[in-house]
Image (cartoon, rainbow, N blue to C red):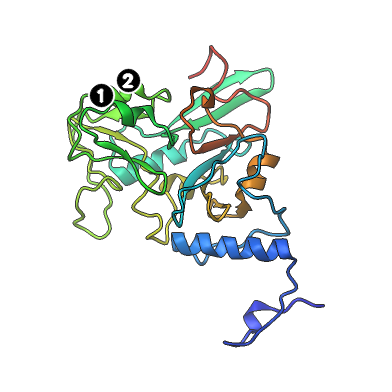
Amino acid sequence: MARASRASVRPGEAVDFGLTPSEEELDMSRRRLLRGLGLAGVAAAAGSLGLVSYRDDVQAAAVGPTSGEEHQWCRVVDLRACKGERKCVAACQERHGLSPEQTWMRTLSWQDEDGEHFMPVMCQMCQDPPCLRVCPVSATFKTDQGVVLVDQDQCIGSRACMAACPYEARYFNWSEPKPAHRMPAPSPNTPEFPGNKVGTVGKCVLCADRIPYSSQLPSCVEACPRGAHYIGDLVTDVAVNGKSTVRLSTFLREGNAVRFKEELGTNPRCYYIPGYGQPVGGPLVGVL
């Protein structure tokens, strides 16, 4: 049967688009994720993607069950696409008003016999975060949708969380921040979009003020010209980078995805696809 054109469908008309069951489920999951992100205009993934439940053992990086929330956010970094341009870092600094010497994301680089490798490192959104346990005033917390945030109105700058983070992904606010681009303005200081007050600790927030309320993706995802950064939803099992849509569990399994320092038991929700066999985090020496 020939597939019908979506553009030719009249309201209320039932049309068979000729999708296979797998294609149909991916299309529905993609639309549920994009509705959650407010991104109805993002293009669908081309072709048929395999249907694998995110609860299945995908060998490379097992994804645990969710809490019953509508969304459970994660991120994926495809290191095969990363060329160390650091536009993700610059976009994060610009959006959050960070000074040049302060970043919520850094890009590791090293060379071996296979060439030069790059790896962006940011808050790994751990589901068992050591930073949360050591905060003396409970300023660090985890949302029901799996995003780890800091309430800077509560933070007293003890820096215990910085010492506890095995990813070195927290930064002390030594100086006044630059004016951030807040929409609408003026906007209050919130954990989802912190004002970076002097004497407090800041970190990547996954642009939580944008998900699922905005038509925009996190700034690092939007800024990467090669589409290396994805934001994913474990509930719908879909990830997007603004250029393509993938079945999350299949993408992780087929890409042999791993998690950084997962042996520490932090249960991070950031997945890396190495692609070239390089060690995640780099060798023991020679990493910048």
Q: Residue furthest right?
A: 1
The numbered mark at residue 72 is: none
Q: Please state if 206 lies on the left or on the right of 15 as rendered.
A: left
Q: 221 or 213: which is nearer to us?
A: 213
User: Do we see residue 67 in this rendering?
Assistant: yes
Amino acid identity at mark 1:
Arg
- Say which quarter of the image contains residue 25: bottom right
The residue wearing badge 1 is 159
Contact (CB < 8 A) between labels 1 and 2?
Answer: yes
Looking at the rendered image, the quarter that the N terminus falls into is bottom right
- Left or right? Give the position of 93 relative to 184: right
Q: Residue 53: x and y, percent?
A: 64, 50
Indicate whether 286 appears above or below 7.
above
Task: Name above or below for residue 137 compared with residue 205.
Answer: above
Q: Picture coordinates of residue 192 (x, y %)?
A: 30, 48
Placement of 177 over or under 49, stated as above or below: above
Residue 210 picture location, percent across and down: 37, 55
Instruction: Indicate left or right for 223 with 52 as reference.
Output: left
The answer for how far apart the CA atoms under marks 1 and 2 are is 7 Å
Front-most of residues 67 and 275: 67
| Residue 278 spot, x, y in % from top left | 64, 24
Q: Residues within 10 Å of mark 2 (few under 14, many from 20)?
A: some
Say what amino acid the circle numbered 2 marks: Ala
Tell whether 16 sits left or right of 37.
right
User: Circle 1 — which element?
Assistant: loop
Query: Which label belongs to residue 163?
Result: 2
- In what element is the residue under mark 2? helix
